[in-house]
Amino acid sequence: MDDLFAPAPITVFDDAEGGMRYWPDVVDPDTATRWFEALRDHAHWQHERRPMYDRIVDVPRLRAGYRLDELPAQLPLAEMLSLVQGRVPAPYTGVGMNLYRDGRDSVAMHHDKLHTLQPGQPIALLSLGGTRRMHIRAREGRRRTWALDLAPGSLLVMSHASQMTHEHGIPKTRQAVAPRMSVVFRARPE
């Protein structure tokens, strides 16, 4: 059931599929903390390496992922999916997670690969743990840039179309920051 008094999202930018929208507090602080701790302590986190230019480098964050039809019962991912579906219904098929342990962990400016997404379906990102700044940049034209502080318990939704027009990333920072986690629901082609 929709809450008639739920705050409207902040529109970062708009497009024909909804653009990028941000709800700063969709999860209460106690629940957000409980979810963060459960995932931090019990998800199957992996340290990855990948080729970049002429060498193999460490991915500067930990990663984990699950198919939605195979969610581990001990993780709160089904609860999280229910919350996301209540705001942004879509035929999500999987959840990917990133754990940014401190300011040295990051993700470079990028857009999701369109061939890995169902056309027309949104990407929903729940943020847990500490606040981190996301940069968002138009890929062409004026190349407008936004800085959005992703607060714990917030939801950021990006349209499929936005992946063609904008990039996003979490830069490194020298400031002391608490660990942060992104929990991202996507609809993948079957």
Image (cartoon, rainbow, N blue to C red):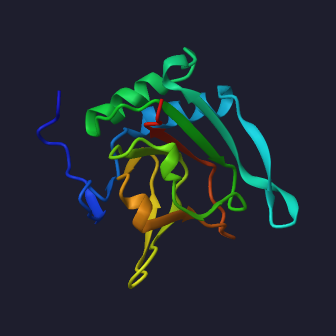
Query: Can you tell which quarter of the image residue 54 is in?
Result: bottom right
Q: 2 and 176: which one is in front?
A: 2
Which residue is drawn at the image coordinates 31% and 32% (left, top)? 85
Which residue is painted at 78% across and 42% down in the image?
A: 47
Where residue 51 appears, as percent x and y from the top left, is 81, 56
- Is residue 128 or residue 68 the one in the foreground? 68
Q: Is residue 168 above or below residue 44?
A: below
Query: Residue pushed farthest bottom?
Result: 142
Comparing 77 with 142, the one in front is: 142
Q: Nearer the viewer, residue 113 or 145?
A: 113
Rendered residue at 49%/26% (across/down): 77
Rendered location of residue 45, percent (x, y): 71, 35
- Vertical placement of residue 123 versus 13, above or below: above
Residue 84 found in image quarter: top left
The answer to whether 75 is drawn above or below residue 166 in the figure is above
Report the residue at 75% width, 37% height from top.
46
Q: What is the number of callouts on the image?
A: 0
**Image location of residue 32, percent across then percent down:** 46, 37
The quadrant of the image that shows the N terminus is top left
> Does 144 appear above or below 64?
below
